[in-house]
Amino acid sequence: MNQVFEDFVVHALREALGLSAQAFPRQARGHRLFLDQGRRVPLYPDRSWWHGSRCLVVGDAKYKRLQADDARQADLYQLLAYTIAADVPGGFLIYAAGEAPEVQHTVVPLGKTLRVMTLDLAGSPAAILARMREIASEVRRLAGPAMRPVEVAPAGPAAPAAP
């Protein structure tokens, strides 16, 4: 069931975000992320949004119930490692359901945002797809800072034309 849930999440996010399989792969095996400078500890985020070779946001989907005591620490540590290796401002975790309220953690002093969300599978197909569009909006918001255009300094005065 875990595989079915993860496949659904990746396909629904791709559709809601209007992305290709290349821009939002099932797993980032084609993109190289490393946790260490020596490039000996490879990381493969389960969910990631790419613009060319640049990662915009990372995340994961877990077919687990989010308990009242919040997200599982191991999942948050994994997500934090992904955000550090990808050098992105934030990431997301999507759980299949839960009793705990959704939460956003800001990791001090790194300023990384870890967004924890749930997708209740007990609803109607229309309700589940509507929730996926809401989740996609949150993913887009997390990727937003990385998508801002880079400002280029204006060029100096134009050289005079040759006579």
Image: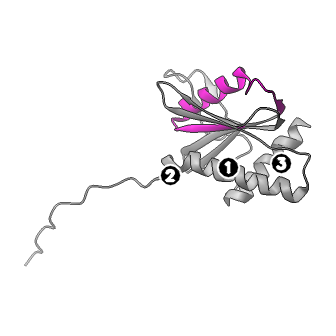
Q: Which residue is mark 1?
A: 24
Q: Which residue is mark 2?
A: 147
Which residue is rendered at x = 26% and y = 55% of the image?
A: 153
Q: Which residue is mark 3?
A: 8
From this viewpoint, which residue is outermost toward the bottom?
A: 163
139 and 46: which is toward the camera: 139
Q: Which mark is residue 123?
A: none
**Is residue 21 placed above or below 159 in the rendered structure?**
above
- Mark 3, Cα crowd under 10 Å, few <14 / some 14-19 / many 20+, is some
Which residue is rendered at x = 61% and y = 51% of the image?
A: 140
128 and 62: which is toward the camera: 128
Residue 108: x percent and y percent? 50, 25
Residue 132: x percent and y percent? 76, 52
Q: Is residue 69 magenta?
A: yes
Q: Nearer the viewer, mark 3 or mark 1?
A: 3
Highlighted range, magenta: 64-93
Amino acid carrying mark 3 in the image: Phe
Q: Is residue 134 magenta?
A: no
Amino acid carrying mark 2 in the image: Met
Q: Secondary structure at mark 1?
A: loop
On the question of residue 76 being in view, the answer is yes
Kindly indicate the quadrant of the structure image that contains residue 29: top right
Q: Secondary structure at mark 2?
A: helix
Amino acid carrying mark 1 in the image: Phe
**Is residue 90 placed above or below 155 in the rendered structure?**
above
Kindly indicate the quadrant of the structure image that contains residue 125: bottom right
Q: CA distance from mark 3 to mark 1?
A: 13 Å
- Mark 2, Cα crowd under 10 Å, few <14 / some 14-19 / many 20+, is some
